[in-house]
Amino acid sequence: MLVETRGRDSSIDETELQFQKLKVRIHEKLVDSLDLSMLAQVSQDNLEVEVRVVAGELCSEMAPHVSGRERERLERELIDEVFGLGPLEPLMLDPQISDILVNNPYEVYVERSGRLERSEVIFADSDHLIRIIQRVVSRIGRRIDESSPMVDARLEDGSRVNAVIPPLALNGPSLSIRMFGAEPLTLDDLIASNSLSADMAEFLIGATAGRMSLLISGGTGAGKTTLLNCMTSYIPDDERLITIEDVAELQLQHKHVVRMEARAANSEGTGEVTQRSLVRNSLRMRPDRIVVGEVRGAEALDMLQSMNTGHEGSMTTIHANDTRDALARLELMVAMAGFELPVSVVRQYIAAGIALVIHVARLKGGIRRVMRISEITGVTESGFTLEDIFGFEQTTVNDRGEAEGDFYVTGYRPKCLGRLRANGIRYHDEMFDRHWSRRGTPGDSV
């Protein structure tokens, strides 16, 4: 039954809303009924059984009209309210979901296969949603309330969480969870999903093994971190990696890794540890390569210093619309370090530290593609000299609303090939001959 409800979306299922409200009332009584001192003595294996028994008794008492499948669902979701994330628990367990986006108690969206769709999940009210948000952030030792109404953190499984509550959130509490698969993707997976061509993958594998420093640019959700994760599996096992992230989400496919995460200031405004201080500290930890999850500010200068002082093969990502925009933003970030460096010096520093810029994009229909792989070949008065090696050209949108197009090789032979050969990396001569390829298959003609 769909009803028009004041202050809420008219498409809300009122029957589902009443179910959620009933569940909340029973859950409150359940919490009051539990003997916490007794539960502390129960083993973890038996704890859920004890709670399930009490939940069943309360369902019979408070909801005698509910039976059959609805009764089973009520008892199951009560367990989720006690031990999990309430209505969100089924979404958290769905391997096809990559993002959970709660706009308010009555509006929950999920992303599947790159497409957003509205979920049937709703909460009883704002208090119900805030309680679940508090449970999420409390698991990682954080708090959220009116004095600290915003949290950006990660769960134990690596999922990234952002929560905002009133007074900052005007339409009610908001929660965003970016999920990470149990098994990290590989370059073979990206080729199979047409995110990049086989030629692109082969070149990036060699560039990674050959210690070329890389900058991966793209918008939110374009696949920057995924590509970075994939490429780390081709770093030689005898090299030591140090990772620095604002919020840890990298799943590096490498054996010898030391991970560090920045820390926000506490409620008293103290205890902050910035990415910049972590980059500086990493230089004292004998790294072979430094991986900065996402460069955002003044740490760009320290990262470039490391790339120019014996830590070739380091990697980072940056939010940008294309390769040139990425380099312009990097210039701006270096300026944020507070040093009065001439623009020409900054550009020379960037060109000396970074060899390749890889741009990824999320196209119509949620399709993710490596749009361009470019080499920085020099610096002029007007900016950087970039030469595209590989690219992707969108040609149409299919009947499913998904972008389609072709990968291509420009015919440019990178200057870095000599350095890669010196490091034992060789490509077949035909790789860089100009050609187009469909569905990531090298040599296909259009």
Image (cartoon, grey):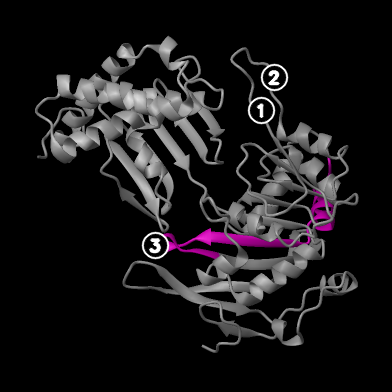
Figure quadrant of residue 237: bottom right
Question: Where 419 falls versus 446 (above or below)?
Answer: above
Percent x, y of residue 432: 71, 82
- Residue 170 coordinates in the image, percent (x, y): 35, 26
Mark 2 or mark 3, earlier in chain = 2
Instruction: Identify the amino acid type marked 3.
Output: Gly
Identify which residue, 424 or 384, lies in the foreground.
424
Q: Which mark is residue 271?
A: 2
Helix, strand or loop at disc 2?
loop
Locate the N terminus and report the quarter of the image it occupies. top left
Task: Please say if 336 is above or below 25.
Answer: below
Circle 3 or circle 1, nearest the eye: 1
**Residue 362, magenta (yes or no):** yes
Q: Residue at x 70, y 82 (%)?
A: 431
**Residue span colored magenta:** 341-369
Q: Quadrant of residue 16?
A: top left
**Residue shown at 90%/72% (left/top)?**
422
Residue at 44% across / 23% down in the picture? 134
**Circle 1/circle 2 CB separation < 8 Å:** yes
Residue 93 x, y percent position in the rendering: 41, 45
Q: Amino acid under label 1? A: Arg
- Identify the mark at residue 367; answer none if there is no mark: none
**Tag 2: amino acid:** Gly
